[in-house]
Image (cartoon, rainbow, N blue to C red):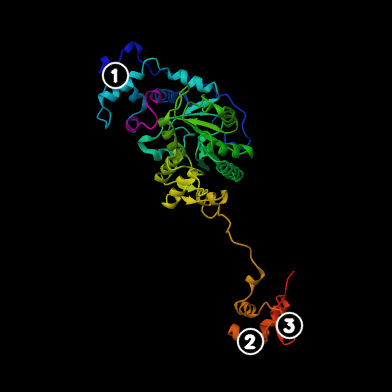
Amino acid sequence: MKQLLGHPQTAQVPQAPQSPQVPRATQSPQAPRAAAAGPPAAAEPERLARVLLNRLSEPGDAVVGRWLAQLPAVDVVRAIRDGTVPDHPGLDSARLAAYQARLPGLAPADDLKRVRDIGGRFIIPGDTEWPSQLDDLGDGRPIGLWTAGTCSLRLLALRSVAVVGSRACTAYGAHVAGELSAQLAERGWVVVSGAAYGIDAAAHRGALAVGGMTVAVLACGVDVAYPKGNAELIRRIGVQGLLVSELPPGEHPNRFRFVLRNRVIAALTRGTVVVEAALRSGALSTARRARDLNRHTMGVAGPVTSELSAGVHALIRSGGATLVTDAAEITELVGAIGDDLAPQRSGPVLPRDLLEPAVARVLEAVPATAEGAPVERLARQSGLPPDEVLQRLYELVSLGFVERHGAHWRVVRRR
């Protein structure tokens, strides 16, 4: 197997010096900060090895994930370089050759320097900034995450909600996504989305507009502005919030990377809200991932005539999502039990709603005509004794509901 790889060109995992301090970017005063200094020198070989594996495999590679569950990343890289195939499910000579084909020319230390130059870093499992909820992805857990911004991903993710939806959204969908995200941000929640056109962009803008925190999980490198039309928005997120990606610097998205990115959004957050989605939509894959990971899955209803809401409606109808209409209902689901309850919704309370049952029965018996009715007729209509009817009528007079006109009683006409 060694013949598959020319050793003089093989990428090595160098013993790197201690990381320099991460350059600081402007950030919101309320933003949880990441550690100012780089990782300890002793951790660098493992970090460099994971950077190399990040280049060799695609996001969510379960074969590498199972391997890393058994061995340190340094040993995994050594095994790939030496061409040794351990007793490992799914790792055969063909897959090993594919990994080896990517090895020549890789420089993990350069990747780390490249992301540090833009104020970013590469975090791995075991770091204090690593969000432990990503471990729910099992063998598909990210090898590491590239971030740009000075906020702590772990702290931001502790109280975060994903807001996702269609790229080709309607004006209604963009408005709802922006309103929900602004309301969530004002309640102290972090809005997570994918920085795409449509609902994603509206969600990020809604949070930024009220000075809130937002995280963009990208399907490309954190130094790549994609889509280009959202370049300024992505720049603002990197300053005020945080950019996150599984892909190393310089990498560009493809269709599969968008789908794999969605699993990180679902695992990272406490719940996912789908604002608009057609029957075939990437946003629905995020919702399904969230449901499979036992996260709260929520949907916003739209017009029944809109194809862009058909996927959300089907999700809600099947029981795969809970209907929500505002941030209060979202936080009631994802927040602390008993602390984030949404207000009870009800129609207006009318004065007659406060009447005791017997008084209300008498009032219902009083006709609205000008001539009114005598006590005897009201007793028959209400089914109460005449003496009690008379008592209740005087109570209604005091409350301004009825008036006496000779021997008859009638409802007060209100202007």
Question: Real-space Cα distance between discs 3 and 1?
Answer: 104 Å
Q: Quadrant of residue 351?
A: bottom right
SS under mark 2? helix
Q: Residue 134: give x, y in percent of width and height.
A: 43, 38
Q: Most extreme residue toward the top, as rendered?
A: 8
Look at 63% across and 35% down and name the residue there. Answer: 29
Q: Residue 37: give x, y in percent of width and height.
A: 54, 26
Label 3, on which residue?
404
SS under mark 1? helix
- What secondary structure is the magenta-colored segment mainly? helix
Look at 59% across and 61% down and name the residue there. Answer: 346
Q: Residue 62: give x, y in percent of width and height.
A: 34, 33
Question: Which numbered marker is on residue 82?
Answer: 1
SS under mark 3? strand
Q: Is residue 265 above or below residue 360?
A: above
| Other residues around mark 2 within 10 Å, as few (<14) / some (14–19) / many (≥20) | some
Q: Which residues are magenta?
A: 53-66
| Other residues around mark 1 within 10 Å, as few (<14) / some (14–19) / many (≥20) | some
Question: Real-space Cα distance between discs 1 and 2?
Answer: 103 Å
